[in-house]
Amino acid sequence: MAKWTVRAIQVGSIDLDRSAMTHYKGKGERITVPIWCAGATDGVHKVIVDTGIRDLEEYKKAEPGVSQTPAQITTAAIKRIMGWDPEEVEIVINTHLHCDHSGSNKEFKNAKFFVQKKEWEAAFNPLVPEAPFYDKLCYDKSAVNYFQWNFLEGDTEILPGLRVITTPGHTRGHQSAMFDTKDGVVCVSGDICNVAENVNGNLEPNIVVMVPETYESFQRIRQFAHYILPGHEPAIEDGSEKFIPVL
C-alpha cells in the first residue's frame, strides 16, 4: 500500500491571547497562530483537509485578530505548496464547518466533499457559543452542489491509508483525518486540537460544546496517531511535512 505525503498549508494568521487556545493557561500572553489546511497525496490522489477563509472582513466579526496575505488565500496557498489548481483536487475533507475551515469550499468544483452528517446538521442549527463561527455561505448550496457531499456517520476509510475518525467536542460533528505516512500515522486534527498542547497536555481548546467528548477525542488521537497537525499550531512551518509528536 502506498504511503501518503502530508504538507501543512498556511491560509492566514490570528493574533490572540494564548489562553484562548489552552483553557485559560497563559492568560495575558499575546501570540500569533496560523490557520492550517493540509494537502496530501499518495502519488495518485489529490486531497485537501479544510479550506480556510471565505471572506476576511466577514471572519473578522468572529476573530478580530485575523489577517491573511495574498499568498495565503487558499487557492494560491495550495498552488504554492502542492502545485495544484483547484479543479485538480479530488477530495476535500472538512474536519468541521466553521468558517476558517470550510470557507473556500466553493473553489473545488470537481471534488468530493466528506463531512460528518452530524456536523452538517449542526452547521445549519448552531448552538449559541458556536454560532458566530458558522457561515452558511461556506457550505450551503451556493458553495457546494449537494451531490458533491458525502455525509459520514462515524469512522470511515476514504482511501487506503486515509481514514477519518470522529473527534467531537469542539463541535458536535467534528472529525479528524488520519494519514498513513512513511513516518507513521499523521493526524490532521482540525480544532479538536487548536495546538499540540491540547492533546499532549490534556487541555481543552478555545471553543468546546461537549466537554467529556473532548477528552475522549484526545484519547482517540493519542491511541492512533504518531504525529499531529493541529488547526492552529505555531510550531509548524508552512509547507512542512514535519509535525508534532503525539505523546
Image (cartoon, rainbow, N blue to C red):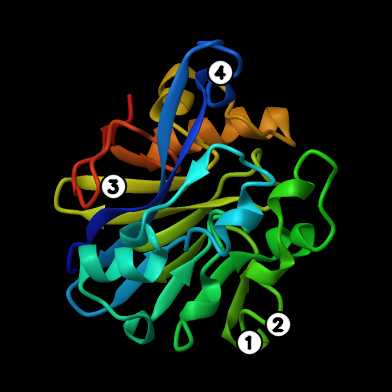
Residue under numbered circle 3:
185
At horizontal 62% and vertical 47% (from top left) the residue drawn is: 60
Vertical side of 234 occupied by 96: above or below: below
* C-alpha separation, residue under disc 3 versus residue under disc 1: 32 Å
Q: Earlier in the sequence, mark 3 or mark 1?
A: 1
Circle 4 packing at 10 Å, graded few (<14), some (14-19), many (20+), is: some
Q: Using the rendered image of the protein, determine whether residue 147 is visible from the camera's viewpoint.
A: yes
- Please state which of residues 195 and 183 is positioned toward the viewer in this rendering: 195
Q: For the N terminus, which image quadrant?
A: bottom left
Tag 4: amino acid: Ser
Q: Earlier in the sequence, mark 4 or mark 2?
A: 4
- Please state which of residues 205 and 104 is positioned toward the viewer in this rendering: 104
* C-alpha separation, residue under disc 4 versus residue under disc 2: 36 Å
User: On the image, which quarter does residue 27 sit in?
Assistant: top right
Q: Using the rendered image of the protein, determine whether residue 225 is visible from the camera's viewpoint.
A: no
Residue under numbered circle 2:
141
Mark 3 vs mark 2: in front: 2
Vertical side of 44 occupied by 167: above or below: above
Horizontal side, residue 129 vs residue 38: left or right: right
Tag 2: amino acid: Lys
Residue under numbered circle 1:
145
- Helix, strand or loop at label 1? It is loop
Numbered badge on residue 19: 4
